[in-house]
Image (spheres, grey):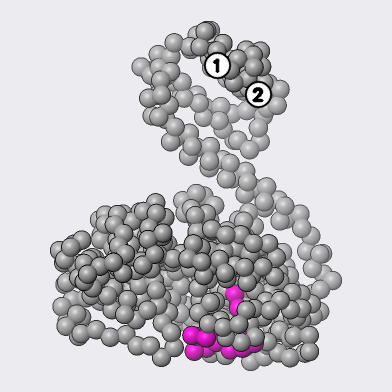
């Protein structure tokens, strides 16, 4: 037809050049396509080009010839218009995206399986020398050093860190605000790793397995009332030693070039090419998952989502206010949107963060520094009549925690503290705020039981139900680039900086 002749000549140079892009010919010459277990095609039966040009029956015949499954849906009264395309395009994107994700995951899993555990045999049971970023003192840049990492002891696992995401908690400790901060130490707690070797008695993971280190362990013992309770994820099995910067037996696995010990951090210490974890801190995940993305489930993203789904259990049509629009706050917004919240208010003093908040589901954004009244009065009075059903503090600032509580709905509002306050700071409010029906609560790791729930979150990411790519705003190569990641985080334009080792 004239239109086709014009289009093919303009785009491809000639009509004959179109044969290189003809679906029927491509199937015959290159099919079947292993990445697609099925190919979806929608065809309007009122299409003027159906006979003589589109010829879907020839495509079906070619697919049958090469063994390619093709599903052709034929629709009465649809023609060749953009309306037809817009009607079914969402189905096509979802249908083929799922298959591409599966194919990509299978390829990644095959590559991981192809890495022989023999590669780790030479180092098992032996000390390993590697690069690590060591925090020598508060408020000082990390130093890239060659350290020695001891082999794991009973109940421990040594892992090779593949990717590490920088979290504000690392900076909080580096800046000297953490009451449990000890120096020198190796920071980092949001990572994706491969098991290199296991200590005596380890049964839940093996060399070659992919794991996410979790600062909230899960011992799963029948005698642990915390692990057995559905009300909490706060397993205390190794809490005391973890807070002291040592392994469960009270000793350390890191040593500098002079043989001096280096403290562990949050039971993880992933700003090192190798680290040692307690077995009960290892969440084993699907090898098909990209570790440079899955690492985000080690802290911030899980915490924000879990605050919504586990701690507060937000119901459909609820109203929500989120204070602090970093990665955790945005994860809260994403979770609230997924839960069906009808009004989601994002609060921050950096308006540059509002665009992403709106993309993820915020209906209103407020720069609290520009208000002529306390932000809680603006939310409960201007944006709403009585306040929001749920509010979340993701800042760690005690005055913001108070504002979050006081904008919660009279009679039933719940306010959840996620941010960690600096050492010595205390929260306060008038008791009348609680007497009039508000609930004040907090969450750690979003209430997720680490070894049970993190693998499920990773699977949801892989299935496309839980997108997280938008959190990764900066990527660096090499553990020695960690200071650059810290600079990026301080810039105010960074959600998560991932460093690949």
Which residue is labeled 1 in the image?
A: 7
Closer to us: 81 or 367 = 367
Camera-side mark, 2 or 1: 1
- Residue name at image x 41 percent, y 60 percent: 353
Image quarter where the C terminus lies is bottom right
First of labels 2, 1 by sequence position: 1
Question: Badge 1: few (under 14), some or many (20 or more) residues near its Cα, within 10 Å?
Answer: some
Q: Which mark is residue 51?
A: none
Is residue 326 something one can see in this rendering? yes
Q: Is residue 183 magenta?
A: yes
Which residue is labeled 2 in the image?
A: 27
| Secondary structure of the residue carrying numbered label 1 | helix
Residue 322 placement (x, y as % from top left): 33, 66
Closer to us: 443 or 218 = 443
| Secondary structure of the residue carrying numbered label 2 | helix
Q: Are marks 2 and 1 in contact (CB under 8 Å)?
A: no
């Amino acid at each position: 037809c004239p239109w086709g002749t014009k289009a093919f000549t303009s785009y491809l140079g000639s009509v004959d050049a179109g044969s290189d892009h003809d679906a029927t010919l491509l199937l015959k010459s290159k099919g079947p396509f292993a990445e697609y277990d099925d190919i979806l095609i929608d065809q309007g039966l009122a299409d003027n080009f159906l006979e003589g040009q589109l010829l879907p029956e020839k495509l079906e015949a070619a697919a049958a010839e090469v063994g390619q499954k093709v599903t052709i849906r034929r629709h009465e009264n649809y023609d060749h218009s953009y309306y037809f395309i817009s009607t079914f395009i969402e189905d096509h994107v979802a249908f083929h995206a799922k298959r591409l994700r599966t194919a990509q995951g299978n390829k990644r899993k095959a590559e991981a399986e192809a890495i022989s555990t023999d590669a780790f045999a030479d180092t098992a049971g032996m000390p390993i020398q590697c690069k690590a970023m060591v925090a020598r003192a508060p408020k000082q840049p990390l130093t890239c050093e060659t350290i020695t990492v001891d082999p794991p002891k009973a109940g421990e696992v040594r892992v090779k860190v593949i990717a590490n995401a920088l979290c504000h908690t690392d900076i909080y400790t580096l800046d000297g605000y953490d009451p449990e901060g000890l120096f020198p130490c190796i920071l980092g707690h949001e990572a994706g790793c491969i098991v290199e070797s296991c200590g005596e008695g380890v049964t839940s993971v093996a060399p070659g397995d992919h794991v996410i280190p979790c600062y909230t362990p899960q011992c799963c013992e029948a005698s642990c009332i915390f692990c057995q309770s559905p009300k909490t994820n706060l397993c205390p099995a190794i809490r005391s030693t973890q807070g002291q910067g040592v392994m469960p037996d009270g000793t350390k696995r890191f040593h500098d070039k002079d043989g001096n010990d280096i403290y562990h951090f949050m039971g993880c210490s992933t700003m090192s090419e190798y680290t040692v974890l307690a077995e009960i801190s290892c969440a084993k995940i699907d090898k098909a998952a990209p570790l440079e993305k899955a690492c985000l489930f080690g802290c911030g993203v899980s915490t924000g989502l879990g605050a919504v789904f586990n701690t507060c259990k937000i119901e459909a049509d609820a109203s929500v206010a989120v204070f602090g629009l970093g990665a955790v706050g945005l994860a809260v917004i994403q979770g609230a949107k997924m839960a069906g919240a009808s009004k989601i208010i994002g609060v921050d003093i950096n308006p540059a963060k509002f665009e992403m908040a709106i993309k993820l589901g915020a209906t209103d954004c407020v720069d609290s520094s520009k208000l002529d009244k306390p932000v809680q009065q603006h939310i409960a009075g201007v944006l709403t009549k009585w306040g929001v059903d749920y509010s979340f503090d993701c800042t760690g600032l005690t005055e913001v925690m108070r504002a979050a509580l006081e904008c919660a709905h009279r009679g039933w509002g719940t306010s959840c503290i996620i941010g960690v306050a600096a050492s010595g700071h205390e929260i306060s409010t008038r008791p009348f705020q609680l007497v009039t029906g508000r609930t004040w609560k907090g969450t750690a790791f979003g209430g997720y039981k680490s070894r049970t729930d993190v693998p499920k979150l990773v699977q949801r990411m892989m299935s496309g139900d839980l997108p997280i790519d938008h959190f990764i705003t900066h990527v660096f190569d090499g553990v020695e680039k960690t200071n650059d990641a810290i600079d990026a985080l301080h810039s105010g334009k960074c959600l998560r900086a991932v460093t690949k080792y």
